[in-house]
Amino acid sequence: MTVVLIVDDHHLIRAGAKNLLEGAFSGMRVEGAETVSDALAFLEADNTVDLILLDVNLPDAEAIDGLVRLKRFDPSNAVALISGETDHELIRAALEAGADGFIPKSADPQVLIHAVSLILEGEIFLPRSYLQGGRMAEVATPLDSSERPEQNLTPRQRDVFELMCKGLANKEIARLLDLSESTVKSHVSAIFKQIGTTSRSKTIAIFRQEGVALPSASED
């Protein structure tokens, strides 16, 4: 049984997402909480979840505060933010805090289903507008090329990393690079080990902090 916890103070949002996701995924149960405090109480009662969908504006938490609190309770929990606004700075801050995705509330239902599917597979989901625009801005002072962290990756690992930054799932990366999915997973694990991280979002955040311009997203 896959369990998703939706943290949103609007009953209509929780009910709508519950109906959508439970209808789209076999063996999924969707629970709801109105606040971060309610979500923490749910988790403290020994309830296990596979994914938390967290609204960014709650009565007891704003912006990434709720994300930080949930990750502090259990860093292994996958947490994706849902928001009525696609704020690039908020997305950047969320990634640096360990978010596993950022889903606009304006997205089509099929986008939510796709996002949840990716995140449950260990991928990261980001809005297309962020992938194609604001997230590509370099931080203020680029490092010398010899000091950049991507210099420690093999050419194939860099290929995988570039596609990973565009939000592609392992299966899609395997198809584009003509590799097996297991080989791609091995490259992703090697990238995490090389950079010293355990998730895609944290890996990308470290590359930003080091002054590296991430690859731009391709147009569909």
Image (spheres, rainbow, N blue to C red):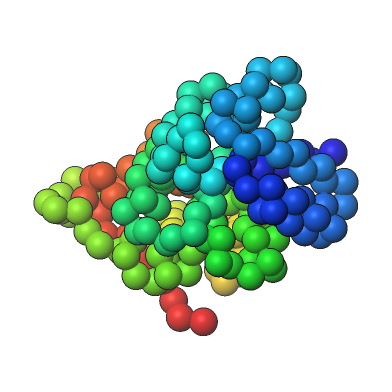
On screen, residue 120 versus residue 71, left or right, reads: right
Q: Residue 31 or 47: which is nearer the viewer? A: 31
Residue 45 screen position, x and y as percent: 72, 17
Residue 70 screen position, x and y as percent: 53, 29
Q: Is 125 located above or below residue 40 in the figure?
A: below
Total labels: the figure holds 0
Q: Is 82 located above or below residue 137 in the figure?
A: above
Instruction: Confirm whether residue 174 shows in the render.
Output: no
Q: Quadrant of residue 191?
A: top left
Residue 83 screen position, x and y as percent: 50, 54
Q: Quadrant of residue 169?
A: bottom right
Q: Residue lying farthest top?
A: 45
Residue at 69% x, 47% y is 11
Q: Quadrant of residue 138?
A: bottom left
Q: Residue 16 or 154: which is nearer the viewer? A: 16
Q: Residue lying farthest bottom?
A: 220
- On the rendered image, what quadrant is the N terminus found in? top right
Residue 94 screen position, x and y as percent: 41, 45
Q: Residue 210 or 57: which is nearer the viewer? A: 57
Instruction: Confirm whether residue 26 shows in the render.
Output: yes
On screen, residue 23 versus residue 179, left or right, reads: right
Q: Residue 38 or 95: which is nearer the viewer? A: 38
Residue at 54% x, 57% y is 103
Residue at 62% x, 37% y is 34
Residue at 57% x, 26% y is 37
